[in-house]
Image: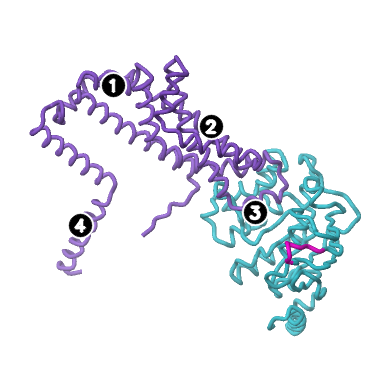
Amino acid sequence: MSSNDTTMTRTTASVFNFSSLIKRDRFAGLIVILLIIAALQVASLFAPDYIAPPPLLIAEKLWTQILPLWDEILVTLIRLLVALVFAMVVGTVLGVVMGMLPGLRPYIRSLVVIDTGIPALSWMLIAVFWFKEPEIRIFFIMSVILIPFYALNVFDGIRALPKEWLEMCESFRPSRWQVLRYLILPHIVAYVFTTTRSVIGYATRMVIFAELIASAVGIGAQMGLAQANFDIAAVFAWTLLLVVLNILSQSLVAVLEKRVLSYRPEVEVR
Amino acid sequence: MNMHADFSPVETQEPAILIDQVNKQFGAVTAIENLSFHVNRGEIVSFLGRTGAGKSTALNLIMGNMSPTSGRVRVMGMDPNKDFRKLRRTISVGFQTDRLLPWRTAIENVELGLQILHYHKAEIREKAREWLARVNLADAADLYPHELSGGMRQRVSLARALAIDPEILLLDECFSQLDHVTSQTLRSDVSAVIREYRKTCLFITHRIDDAIEMADRILVLGAPARLLLEVSPTPEDRTDRDKFQLLHDKIADALGVDS
């Protein structure tokens, strides 16, 4: 190969690497974060601190005031986890019942559809009236909001079950329980993961909202306090923390999903 | 007889499969018209007909997935629809497509029927390994379906059907999705296994070659499903090229297709 050819190959390779780099999610995410920080810095030059605090002040708040409140953060995360697991179990059971018991299907589906039509704020206000204990309020709010997502997606999963698999399974003349155990439950695992991934961000927002309305402890309550003190830098710092927590929880679910559903081939569309 | 499984094979002197003056209507459409035939125990019978001849409907009647509009269907002397659960372990099916469960490895797919029949855990693994080896897939036990070729997947599927040691094996065009060479190899392997274990087999196909090479008796169906011709190929029909062609032409004539 001549030196010219080598140079050309290198140039092509470096162009290719750069083009693949700018398409990467992490690279794009980093660029967007830098742009947001720059925009905030520029805004802070023209607006007072209580409107647009400089990024350094937000970072300082995060480090000195927010992170030491780890117990508040932990409370929110535990509330989120407990509600998510409960909604997953109850929603999956409801979805399976809808999928396997046609007699009960229209009743449960109507109940779930009505539930999805009720605004989250209504549930929060109702919870404040109904329950005295903040933990029960938040658990109730999160459950009624999240259960329909699991129920409807699991039901969709059962409807999408290939009829051929069912016929194959039934050729061994199994009991209803065996069909559930060997066919339906493994099949809906993918749907449960997809639901979890899609609701985790929404659930995080809802738990913060519920804490703001119905509790004096947790990230939502702390954000309410920051708002009452006109401490916008703290609001930004809490928000930053929530974004990081959300990305981490999404990544955790994605890793679990990849591990549990390792049987699925990786498909890449050109 | 396996003492560990919760169901024992049905013992009766009646033919393995009996279809007696059966009609099956779907609304105004007649799928099966006055069909009668039987399959003796240990016999390999091929069901040959063009697409839409009602072969799959007949299979569903035998499997007990539906009941006839009129007439009598018996499997080992029992009504397969009414006595659905009693025929556990008696019937097993090899389908047109492999129908492997993607979350199970090859060996776990073979284990499915054994698990449903409550075999002991150790016995399940042992039998599944034995049947995978029998279909020449011992090395592929831990591979997932997407890692297997079409022929390998179909072998796993047949191992799954045979692993429960059924009295009757129903094969529904299970070689038709494969290329000619794979289909021929697999057909000859399965045929050898069925004869070795003296299984009763009803083999549904639309390929005349498959039927002649595999069956003791061929039932040619017209549409709607009714018997047009019944022939029993001799060993010479399979080995002698002219005789094979003669029988092939006779069946093709009955089916109304170009040989």
Closer to the observer: label 2 or label 4? 2
Q: Which residue is mark 1?
A: A224
Tell me what hue chain A is rendered in.
Answer: purple
C-alpha gap between disc 2 and disc 1: 31 Å
**Which chain does the numbered disc 4 sit on?**
A
Specify which label sits upstream in the sequence, 2 or 1: 2
Q: Residue at x 37, y 18 (%)?
A: A215
Q: Is residue B216 magenta?
A: no
Q: Which residue is more in the foreground, B167 or A37? A: A37
Tell me what hue chain B is rendered in.
Answer: cyan
Label 2 element class: helix
Closer to the observer: label 1 or label 3? 1
Kind of residue at disc 3: Ala
Q: Which residue is mark 3?
A: B133
Kind of residue at disc 1: Gly
Q: Which residue is mark 2?
A: A89
